[in-house]
Image: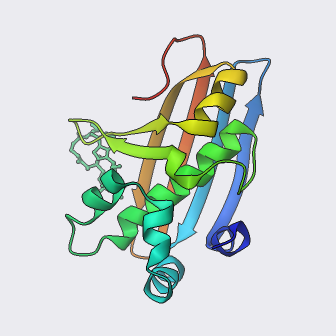
């Protein structure tokens, strides 16, 4: 599926602020859950292309996985904003939402996403997710200075 189709799932989008000079980058994204539900029902292959095995496994533990998948899609798109790139520049699967023992989500970057982050000096990432019946929202923040990339 092309980026345009997935980007149309985002109901509300904005970049809160980003500056390489400050060493800080922020991205936010929202995904309309009913729209994602329709896309995944129509094109089940999208689930495997967009979400990692770990993400699918986590969401699959819930009676309704779609809000959890929607939050993860929002996180990937928010991370792209923090990286300063658009849809298609990095693979969705190279931005993985993981779960810490506390339940807090973390972001792990691989492939081109990790290289872009390295180029921008962004080494520490933080992520917050929320979802209601209709909307999933993710905020991603990244900063430079710490020698790690992930949770
Ligand atoms: C964190 C918490 C308050 C969110 O509850 P909520 O309002 O019902 O749910 P929301 O839709 O706003 O948020 C759900 C997301 O919160 C995130 N989350 C879960 N536990 C979290 C934690 N300890 N810290 C940060 N985020 C957390 C998860 O990403 C979750 O989405 P996911 O299951 O798809 O990954 C709730 O999970 C909770 O009470 N957890 C246990 C207590 C806790 O650790 N609180 C931390 C703040 S004091």
Looking at the image, is 131 positioned above or below residue 5?
A: above
Residue 132, position in %: x, y? 40, 68
Is 15 or 41 nearer to us in this picture?
41
* Colouring: rainbow
- Please state which of residues 112 and 100 is positioned toward the viewer in this rendering: 112
Task: Give how far across and how far down residue 81 sits, in percent.
Answer: 69, 45
Residue found at x 38% / y 68%: 67
Query: Picture quarter containing residue 20?
Result: top right
- The residue that appears at 61% across and 49% down in the rendered structure is 78
- Which quadrant of the figure contains the N terminus? bottom right
Residue 47 image offset from top left, x and y in percent: 44, 69
Residue 122 in view: yes
Image height check: is 129 above or below 108? below
In percent of the image, x 72 and y 49: which residue is there?
A: 89
- The count of marks equals 0
Is 148 situated left or right of 64 in this image?
Answer: right
Examine the rendered structure and indicate whether residue 132 appears above or below residue 41: above
Which image quadrant is residue 23 in? top right
- Residue found at x 55% / y 67%: 31
Locate the C terminus by quadrant. Answer: top left
151 on left or right of 124: left
Where is residue 44? Give x, y as percent: 43, 80
Observer able to see residue 33: no
């Amino acid at each position: 599926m092309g980026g345009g189709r997935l980007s149309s799932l985002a109901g509300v989008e904005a970049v809160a602020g980003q500056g390489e000079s400050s060493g800080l980058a922020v991205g936010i994204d929202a995904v309309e859950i009913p729209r994602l539900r329709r896309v995944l029902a129509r094109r089940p292959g999208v689930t495997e292309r967009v979400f990692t095995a770990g993400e699918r496994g986590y969401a699959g533990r819930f009676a309704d996985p779609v809000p959890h998948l929607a939050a993860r899609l929002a996180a990937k798109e928010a991370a792209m904003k923090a990286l300063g790139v658009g849809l298609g520049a990095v693979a969705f699967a190279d931005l993985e939402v993981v779960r810490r023992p506390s339940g807090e989500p973390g972001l792990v970057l691989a492939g081109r996403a990790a290289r872009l982050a390295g180029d921008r000096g962004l080494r520490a990432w933080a992520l917050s997710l929320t979802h209601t019946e209709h909307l999933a929202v993710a905020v991603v923040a990244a900063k430079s200075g710490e020698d790690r990339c992930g949770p």
